[in-house]
């Protein structure tokens, strides 16, 4: 109970006691006594109402504290299980990604075909991948990656074309990443490039799965795009 509440209750109680003492000591007419008794009853009723109000206010404060505590705990649990996905594009001469720690290529049919080409010509070819990295505290579940790139390749008969890639990863642990193969350049030249048109990442986590919440969708455009070229690569990324 707060100090202010205690003071109000003590003052009210003292007033009621003072009223009884006055009635007891004073030589008053019956009508006057009846009036004072009525006033005392009203004062007692006010004291009861004050006590009830204080209890309601105290319960309200406790309920608000409980709700705030539950919200804080829920946010802490959600944060500890949440993933945080970063998207980038890189070009490399090594499709096995042996030099990239905790980055695993998605071994789909496109990647297998590129790997076969690499085994026949290891010197000139350059490979473009998009990488999704989890820098959050929790694992990403049911990760779906969708990308679209514009590619210009002087060694290709089409020269400029559009590449669409999709992949699903069941689980992506924290501090790890996956790389989705986009395209390869068999004989790279200075005018070759791969340019992101758009990309999306849709993923959930164990906390959202337990609550049956919808997955989060992250859209990536050219302006939010990060890219890097390994040493010795000619192909330009944008």
Image: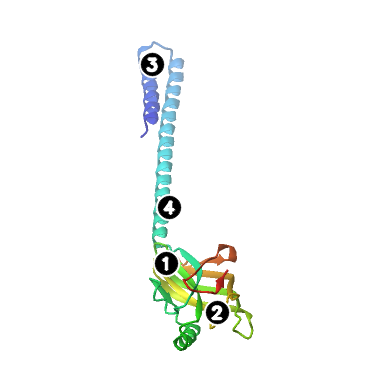
Where does the N terminus fall, quadrant-wise?
A: top left
Per the image, label 1 sits on a secondary structure element best described as helix
Per the image, label 2 sits on a secondary structure element best described as loop
Categorize mark 1 by other alpha carbons within 10 Å: few (<14), some (14-19), many (20+).
few
- In front of the other: label 3 or label 2? 2
Vertical order, 49 against 39 (above or below): below
Give the residue displayed 63% in from the left and 81% down from the top. 159
Earlier sequence position, callout 3 versus callout 2 = 3
Earlier sequence position, callout 4 versus callout 1 = 4
Labelled pair 1, 3 in contact (Cβ < 8 Å) = no
Per the image, label 3 sits on a secondary structure element best described as helix
- In front of the other: label 2 or label 4? 2
Decide which of 216, 28 is in the foreground and name it: 216
Residue designated by label 2: 188
Residue designated by label 1: 210
Labelled pair 2, 4 in contact (Cβ < 8 Å) = no
Residue 156 found in image quarter: bottom right
Residue 213 shows in this picture: no
Earlier sequence position, callout 1 versus callout 3 = 3
Q: CA distance from mark 3 to mark 2?
A: 108 Å
Residue designated by label 3: 23
Categorize mark 4 by other alpha carbons within 10 Å: few (<14), some (14-19), many (20+).
few
Decide which of 109, 92 is in the foreground and name it: 92
């Amino acid at each position: 109970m707060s100090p202010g509440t205690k003071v109000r209750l003590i003052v009210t109680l003292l007033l009621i006691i003072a009223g009884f003492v006055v009635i007891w000591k004073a030589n008053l007419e019956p009508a006057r006594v009846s009036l004072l008794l009525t006033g005392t009853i009203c004062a007692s009723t006010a004291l009861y109402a004050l006590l009830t109000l204080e209890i309601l206010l105290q319960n309200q404060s406790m309920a608000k504290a409980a709700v705030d505590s539950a919200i804080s705990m829920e946010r802490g649990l959600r944060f500890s299980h949440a993933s945080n996905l970063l998207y980038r594009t890189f070009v490399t001469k090594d499709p096995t990604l042996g030099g990239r720690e905790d980055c695993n290529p998605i071994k789909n049919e496109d990647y297998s075909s590129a790997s076969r080409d690499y085994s026949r010509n290891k010197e000139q070819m350059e490979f473009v991948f998009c990488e999704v990295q989890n820098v959050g505290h929790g694992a990403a579940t049911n990760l779906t990656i969708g990308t679209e790139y514009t590619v210009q390749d002087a060694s290709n008969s089409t020269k400029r074309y559009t590449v669409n890639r999709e992949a699903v990863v069941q689980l992506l642990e924290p501090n790890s990443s996956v790389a989705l193969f986009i395209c390869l350049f068999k004989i790279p030249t200075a005018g070759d490039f791969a340019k992101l048109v758009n990309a999306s990442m849709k993923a959930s986590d164990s906390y959202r799965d337990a609550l049956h919440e919808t997955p989060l969708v992250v859209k990536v455009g050219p302006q939010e795009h990060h890219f890097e070229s390994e040493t010795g690569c000619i192909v330009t990324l944008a």
